[in-house]
Image (tube, rainbow, N blue to C red):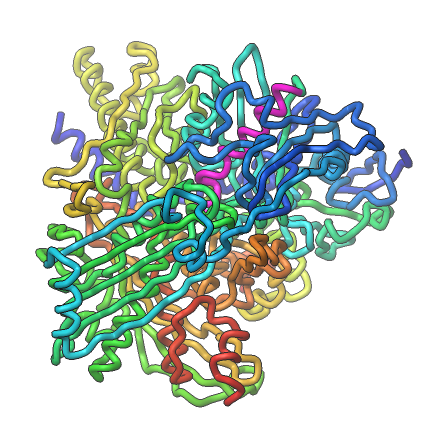
Amino acid sequence: MPKLTLRVNRQTHTIDCSASTLLVEALREQLRLTGTHVGCDTSQCGACTVHVDGASVKSCTMLAVEAEGAEITTIEGLADGDKLHPMQAAFQEHHGLQCGFCTPGMVMSAVDLCKRVKAPSEPEVRTWLEGNLCRCTGYHNIVKAVMAGADGMNGGKP
Amino acid sequence: MDSGTASASRRVTSEAVGTSLPRVDGIAKVTGRARYLDDLDAVGAWHGVTVRSTIPHGILDGLDRDPAFDWTDIVVVTAADIPGQNVITLIELDQPALVPVGGTIRHVDEAIALVAAPTRARAFAAARAITARVTPLVPVLSIEDALTGPIQLHGADNVFKRFAIRKGHATDGEIEAALAASAHVIDSVYRTSPQEQMYIEPQAMMAEWREGACHVTGSMQCPYYVHKAMKPLLDLHAEDVIISQTVTGGGFGGKEEYPSMIAAHAALLAKVAQRPVKIVYDRDEDIAATTKRHPALIRHRLGLDALGNPTVIDVDVVMDGGAYATLSAVVLSRGVLHAAGPYKCPVVRIVGRVVATNHPPHGAFRGFGAPQTTFAYERQIEKAARLMGADPLAYRRRHALRAGDTTATSQVLGYSVATDEVLDAIEQCAGTPPVRDGVNASGAPVKRGRGVCFYFHGAGFTGSGEQRLAGRATVALAAGGRFEVRASSTDIGQGAITIFTQLAADGLGVDASRIDVIDPNTARVPDSGPTVASRTCMVVGGLVEAGAKLIAARIRAWAESVGRAGSIEDLADDAFGALGPIAETTQYTPPPGIAWDDATYTGAAYPVFGWAACLVDVAVDLDTYEVAIERCVQAVDVGKAINPAIVKGQIEGGTLQALGWAVLENVVYKNGKVANATMTNCIVPTFADAPELETIIVEVPYPFGPHGAKGVGEIPMDGPAAAVANAVALALGVEFDELPISPEVVAQRLGGQS
């Protein structure tokens, strides 16, 4: 099987990979980064969202070979050691999760939004995250968490 | 000792119970460290795939394997490989794990064979290389067909189960006479659609055989349901079946009974393959094959006197059970028990039937029959208020049950009736109703309207169910000054682990960080009953609190005997050294004065009810016919919020599922097959569909719940759909008695006018 070099969470990995391997398959099955989840097969749910060169991407919509040379970040690479990323901390503090299955994708999407928009409004959060489904929370606490996470990413200043 | 326990629990009450402690499982979930079933490493595990029927009804004449396919590394399992009885044990013993050759196929996507292979792709390819030879039979594909058509799928009348509730009359003739004597009769027929649970983690299970014992782990709500189903199927003793729950990505009822089926399949494949086998459903398979909310057809007749007082309620509920009995009888039971609503009425007749069809079995989903009947009665009450020219909230308040009143089953409500509290809460924040004609944010013309709804939900199992279950939970002293909670209640996202932690901490008088709620595993935890029916906090939480208090008392007694003083935290480690891993297992006992008669369906249907009211403002877009929810307020009485943030999260999540059911969710069957089995067209609300939810927690304590708590999981699902329909009816001046109120339906009903 052909080899592919992927740069994931600041480390370089060489993996076996066919031309049709999806990025999410490479991450989960080859690199065992199982925090990136698969909730559908139609790019609806967003549970597989990761960052490719800093931009959020549904990793089920991208071939692994397309990600060669890019800097990929998964949920496992977001925290700084034991120190949670401000967005992770905000989800935990504001009860922005229940079953947690959508959470990694939700957090990765939200981080991308807050890098683009320093202090997103509630409608901006809802519009940006429309491609991430959650069935537990009614979205209410996720919106609160993302807005708090944005503050946290700005060093605590709203 | 008693006063010491009481003061300790008062002291700590301010520390754990009543605070929004962050979720115990939160850090693992926000970092991606939480392991769901498909994330587990299992050395040498193969992947299992299910071969399914393509017809709704017929005889399975044979299974043919494509001779051109390479079968070398494939395991195939058919019904002939089942060591025990070919049945998924639940209430009835009618559903096979696999349709046997010569047997009857009863729904599309029924399991007829299984394959396992080293990779998922190989397993899918093998499944495609198996063809079923069938003799099709005429299917039954609607409630009407089941009731009046010529095909008999079950007994002589296709009725799986029927119930009748009678109050204030002895004969059917009296009902007709009471209706005839009423000044007004509101007579309407309601239809509700099937609904998909759409937990974001698809169903997933893994099985492995070790030394003759079968170990199954996976995504599930009820480990002991799976345990009960595996024993006869695999012909094993109880101790040779070990079921454990992995982190579970949502359930909502959808992982109540169906996991037994997948566990059976994984166990059979693992036995033949002689290695672990993992089955993870694709989303389309999950939507197509697993259980949904029962569609219902409800005729509701409400008689009023000249002043608008209800004089007679007559309800006929029919639900589509699908191909097998599964939990339909219990769903119907809860449906009929809620069908008269929380209103005073001297004469009530409720008749319920659940019928057999050739749809995939319908099953448990949050609310469990009550959302269907709540939709009907709250539309009826709305129509009554309008007929009488009354304010909808004031009309409800005038006729609602209070303590001392009797329900349809002649249950006298003794305590914890929160009618006025929830109605007050809604009234106080209602504000001015929207102006009917206007434009929305994109400038399109809209009609706006406001709807309200008032409802109740019985907490815990129906009737004598909790006594029969006799749920148990254990609290134990562990090494290092720690304590263990052992219960089979699963955390499926609703926060069970965190709530148990808080209750145990306060019962013991220790910090929450000292508590370990251990993962449910039938080899290590007692049977606390299933994680269903809004019972986990109220019933099992009560057992945890009781066990914690008993352990604290034993530690104090030991301390006293050796002349030690100090807090339980200070004493715990030495107590462990002296006493060892002492454990206290408590068992549910019903509150005093609870009597239920299954034969007549009279008495205390539930030990206590939760109460709720909802207000919804809608805007119907006159260009697209979309119903937008502009505001949704729900006030819910939960007795006591053990963790307010988790309680609000339960209410918000349930509310959005109800709003989705009201306006956009639907499962469409074509010739018995789910026609929209992907997330692309079997839609659920997104961020953009969801309004900002306003949630008001009301606390009218239940004297026999932990700290006064009663159920919260299901009640938010019951009412909002009726509130939406009531709002749309006002906005458009057209009655909507069917769900969902989708753009297609609105367009059809408006008939091109706008």
The image shows residue B609, relative to residue B746, as above or below, that is above
Residue B729 % position (x, y): 38, 79
Nearer to me, B306 or B679: B306
Locate the N terminus of chain B by quadrant.
Answer: top left
Residue, x 69% and y 45% (percent of image)? A74
Residue B310 in which image quadrant: bottom left
Q: Which residues are magenta?
A: B252-272
Report the side of B431 relative to B56 (left or right): left
**Eyeballing the image, is B340 above or below B282?**
below
Q: Picture quarter containing residue B119?
A: top right
Can residue A156 be spotted in the picture? no
Which residue ends up furthest to the right in the rendered image? A2
Q: Is residue B404 left or right of residue B631?
A: left
Magenta highlight on residue B254: yes
- Outermost residue to the front: B150
Residue at the limit of the structure toward the left, as seen here: B404
Q: In this image, B478 relative to B597: left or right? A: right
